[in-house]
């Protein structure tokens, strides 16, 4: 165990753990958009920046990827941290002017859209945090989506920007997306689901008749786990 | 029929290239470079072949192929013209040369002519500012460029150039 101080509170954390984890398990809230427990941390959104003090020097680090150290003094609310946080939110607001969650976070710290940052029109609500790409690769293990191009043109999507053969329509990417950029739509009857421009046929549960999962996803799960498809065609509630 | 054959041929070529690198996924960039050298660009089928032979998801290959400016997903021209518009070349008149090439080839920077003869793009510094303005013609650096010199270069490459002189 490592002893450190966060916001004047003495806390303990496991070695190799991060400042963000240590803070969260001690009830200290640090805002973040791109952090997810189960995925490789990308440190992309910069919202969780905190100030650390080692000896006489202080500096700003990203708490979701900075590992705890013995005797570290962390400040999550100092003026310097708030300045960073406000700037990050100003930039995120300019990138995703439509994003509700970013607007809410900004309101919390009193940030308004800045005239000096011209709002983007073509970025949607994507903050390029890479969580969707990671969940697709690490958890679902199909790697249907990825980033393309770079700099101002960088965007998330399927290869060649066309319906992906690898995608199984599970919707994990839409689920982890912190801003709701990835849209998954279901037809009124529930028979079809559209995600990444690909239409999936949904399977109706053999017992209750509810459309609950795309055919391709069940086939993929069957192939991977060896569970017969006949079993998978019953929804989780009826099993 | 011929289309199927050409795709098959392409896959064989890609396979050869990948085997040269021991099917090591760490060599994605050099493999793609060789594939591009072979076909003059990165065709979709070739990228799919790289993906399946290396056992790397196509989304990862697409990330690499679109990240680097050296890779092109659309066919490139037989002749490649790169004009430096870095600071030194810029102040020495690169914009004039740029607009001249644009006019003569009817080509915006970053584009390829429909007959696949010329590709024209601008770069930001080639590290030889003393030679500026520089035009790179099929890999060959040509320094102290002027508008009339570019016309000569284009003529040499087989382009009919209309100038005020003739």
Image: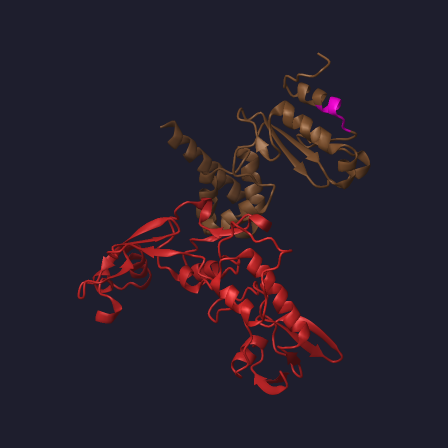
Chain colours: A red, B brown
Which stretch did the figure color magenta? Answer: B145-150
Specify whether A133 is left or right of A227: right
Q: Position of residue B9 (x, y in %)?
A: 44, 33
Image-quadrant location for residue B139: top right
Above or below — where is A22 with respect to A107? below
Above or below — where is A58 with respect to B15? below
Specify whether A70 is left or right of A224: right
Position of the N terminus of chain A, as image quadrant, is bottom right
* Majority secondary structure in the magenta region: helix
Above or below — where is B156 with respect to B127? above
Specify whether B21 is left or right of A53: left
Q: Residue at x 66, y 16 (%)?
A: B162
Q: Position of residue A216 (x, y in %)?
A: 30, 55
Q: Is residue A239 visible?
A: no
Q: Is residue A194 visible?
A: yes
Number of marks in picture: 0
Q: Position of residue B135 (x, y in %)?
A: 72, 31
Q: Position of residue A190 (x, y in %)?
A: 26, 57
Above or below — where is A80 with respect to B74? below
- Between residue A61 and residue A30, name the one nearer to us: A30
Q: Residue at x 63, y 16 (%)?
A: B160
- Between residue A112 and residue A219, name the one nearer to us: A112
Which residue is situated farthest in the left direction here? Answer: A207
Which residue is situated farthest in the right direction here? Answer: B130
Q: Is residue B119 magenta?
A: no
Image-quadrant location for residue A238: bottom left
- Between residue B92 and residue B140, name the one nearer to us: B92
Position of the C terminus of chain A, as image quadrant, is bottom left
């Amino acid at each position: 165990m490592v002893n450190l101080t966060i916001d004047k509170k003495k806390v303990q954390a496991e070695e190799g753990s991060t400042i963000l984890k240590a803070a969260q398990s001690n009830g200290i809230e640090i805002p973040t958009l791109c952090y997810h427990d189960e995925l490789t941390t990308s440190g992309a959104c910069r919202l969780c920046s905190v100030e650390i003090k080692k000896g006489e020097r202080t500096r700003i680090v990203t708490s979701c990827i900075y590992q705890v150290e013995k005797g570290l003094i962390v400040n999550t609310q100092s003026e310097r941290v708030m300045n960073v946080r406000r700037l990050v939110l100003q930039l995120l607001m300019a990138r995703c002017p439509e994003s509700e969650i970013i607007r809410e976070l900004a309101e919390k710290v009193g940030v308004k859209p800045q005239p000096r940052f011209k709002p983007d029109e073509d970025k949607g609500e994507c903050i390029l945090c890479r969580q969707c790409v990671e969940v697709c690769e690490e958890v679902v293990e199909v790697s249907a989506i990825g980033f393309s191009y770079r700099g101002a043109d960088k965007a998330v999507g399927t290869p060649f920007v066309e319906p992906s053969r690898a995608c199984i329509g599970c919707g994990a990417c839409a689920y982890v997306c912190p801003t709701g950029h990835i849209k998954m739509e279901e037809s009124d009857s529930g028979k079809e689901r559209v995600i990444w421009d690909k239409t999936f046929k949904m399977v109706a549960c053999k017992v209750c008749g509810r459309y609950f999962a795309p055919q391709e996803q069940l086939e993929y799960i069957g192939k991977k786990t060896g569970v017969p498809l006949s079993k998978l065609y019953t929804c989780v509630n009826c099993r | 029929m011929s289309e199927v054959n050409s795709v098959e041929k392409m896959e064989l070529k890609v396979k050869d290239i990948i085997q040269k690198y021991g099917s090591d996924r760490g060599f994605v960039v050099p493999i793609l470079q060789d594939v591009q050298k072979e076909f003059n660009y990165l065709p979709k089928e070739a990228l799919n072949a790289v993906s399946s032979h290396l056992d790397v998801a196509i989304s990862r290959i697409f990330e690499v192929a679109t990240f680097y400016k050296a890779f092109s997903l659309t066919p490139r021209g037989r002749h490649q013209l790169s004009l430096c518009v870095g600071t030194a070349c810029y102040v020495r008149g690169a914009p004039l040369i740029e607009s001249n090439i644009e006019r003569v080839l009817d080509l915006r920077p970053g584009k390829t002519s429909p007959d696949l003869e010329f590709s024209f793009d601008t770069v930001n510094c080639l590290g030889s500012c003393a030679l500026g303005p520089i035009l790179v013609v099929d890999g060959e650096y040509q320094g102290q460029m002027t508008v009339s010199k570019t016309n000569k270069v284009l003529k040499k490459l087989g382009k009919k150039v209309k100038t005020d002189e003739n």
